[in-house]
Image: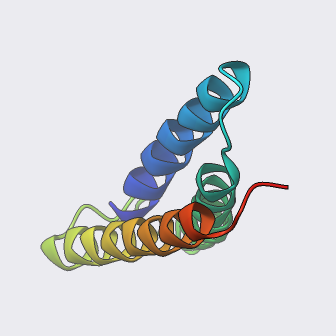
């Protein structure tokens, strides 16, 4: 479940980053957060493939894994909030 959550979050933040760039708005916080979620998704992809090759299911859809996915999403949103506050306080060049 955490794999699916991180993939969805990476896609959402990447789309928001692209839209902000097209509109000419600063988007460093969006881009950094998208990369963080992409890194987490890649990490869990490797874990899912390893589990599958060991004979387990490809995705873990347990309640504990859903809680982990929610925690990762919350941490990513906290990262975005902190980066956005920092971005707002930094004067434009």
Q: Can residue 70 be seen in this snapshot?
A: yes
| Residue 59 x %, y % | 40, 58
Residue drawn at 61 percent across, 53 percent down: 34
Is residue 22 positioned above or below 57 on the image? above
The one nearer the camera, 81 or 32, is 81
Q: Is residue 14 left or right of residue 9?
A: right
Q: Is residue 86 left or right of residue 39?
A: left
Quadrant where the N terminus is found in the figure: bottom left
Is residue 65 positioned above or below 7 on the image? below
Q: Residue furthest top?
A: 22
| Residue 89 x %, y % | 57, 70
Q: Residue furthest right?
A: 93
| Residue 31 x %, y % | 68, 51
Q: Can residue 58 be seen in this snapshot?
A: no
Q: Residue furthest left?
A: 63
Number of disc labels? 0
Residue drawn at 25 percent across, 61 percent down: 61
Quadrant where the C terminus is found in the figure: bottom right
Quarter of the image where one finds residue 29 = bottom right
Is residue 23 positioned above or below 51 on the image? above
Residue drawn at 48 percent across, 38 percent down: 12
The colouring scheme, among rainbow, by chain, secondary structure or one colour, is rainbow
Residue drawn at 55 percent across, 48 percent down: 10
């Amino acid at each position: 479940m955490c794999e699916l959550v991180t993939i969805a979050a990476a896609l959402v933040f990447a789309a928001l980053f692209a839209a902000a760039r097209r509109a000419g708005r600063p988007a460093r916080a969006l881009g950094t957060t998208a990369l963080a979620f992409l890194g987490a998704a890649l990490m869990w992809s490797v874990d899912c493939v390893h589990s599958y090759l060991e004979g387990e299911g490809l995705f873990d859809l347990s309640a504990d894994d859903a809680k982990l996915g929610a925690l990762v999403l919350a941490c990513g949103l906290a990262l975005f909030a902190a980066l956005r506050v920092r971005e707002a306080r930094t004067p434009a060049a």
